[in-house]
Image (cartoon, grey):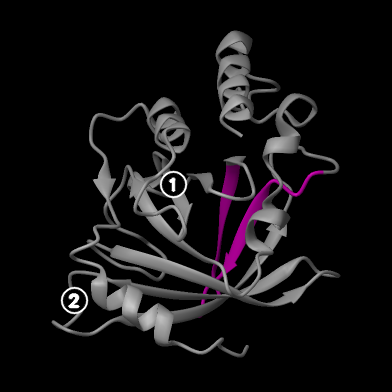
Amino acid sequence: MLLSASLFTLTVAIVGVSVDGYPDWANEKRFGKFQDAWTSIGQDPSVIYYLARTDYKDDVGSWGEGFKCVAVRETNKNDEEKSVMSHFFYKNKQTPEGEVNEVTEKVTAIKEYGYQDVYNAIQYHLQNGNTLNDTLVFSDGVSCDLFQVPYANSGAGGFELWVNGANIRNIPKYCDFLFKYFSKKEEEFTIYNEDDCKDVVEKVNASKEPHA
């Protein structure tokens, strides 16, 4: 997969221009096979992903200000409507010491940037009735996902690097490289820190699979 990730990045760099005003990487013909959002979210409930890094510090959706230690488990997979229930565990500035926040949201795979066949984005259905869309820049379907978050940084946009729990202690170098390459921001935020997130990991491991 390292070779595939390297070729993906090299090809984007060579292209150098946007298609129909879209980002260079939003090209279904060239990169669609790396951007299958349904495969990304349609994981077995036993698989946990952790938000490893972002280039923004506050979330306008559910995680709040200064969010950290974000983990997600996907359940209730619906192949027909390409949706799952995402159960998030997280902490933020308002979280009392020793506690872990939880929220469950429906997430649906959708198409963005004019894609015809590949479901290259996800839509969060927030508990307040609003929706937020994130576009998948790259996924190997196993180790890491890189998402574009257009509403981050006060609408300027940002990126998220999600990593499989099996790899969170030793994030594959190509995953880190892709995050840094596409973000291009000097400031980045480490969302998962092993010492800070022990209580979240324990909560995730102890939790039963949630119901919708």
In percent of the image, x 25 and y 68: which residue is there? 197
* Residue position for label 2: 94
- Foreground: 77 or 195? 195
Badge 2 amino acid: Gln
Q: Is residue 131 magenta?
A: yes
Asked if the stretch drawn in magenta spans residue 48, the answer is no
Q: Is residue 22 left or right of residue 178?
A: right
Q: How many marks?
A: 2
Q: Which quadrant would residue 39 be assigned to in this image?
A: bottom right
Q: Specify the amino acid type for callout 1.
A: Leu
Outermost residue, left side? 97
Rendered location of residue 37, percent (x, y): 68, 52
| Residue 102 showing in the rendered view | no
Look at 57% across and 15% down and name the residue there.
Answer: 10
Q: Position of residue 207 (x, y in %)?
A: 45, 87
- Decide if residue 14 is on the left or right side of residue 192: right
Q: Nearer the viewer, mark 2 or mark 1?
A: 1
**Which disc is residue 161 wearing?**
1
Determine whether the residue tagged by mark 1 lies in a helix, strand or loop. strand
Q: CA distance from mark 2 to mark 1?
A: 23 Å
Q: Residue at x 52, y 47 (%)?
A: 144
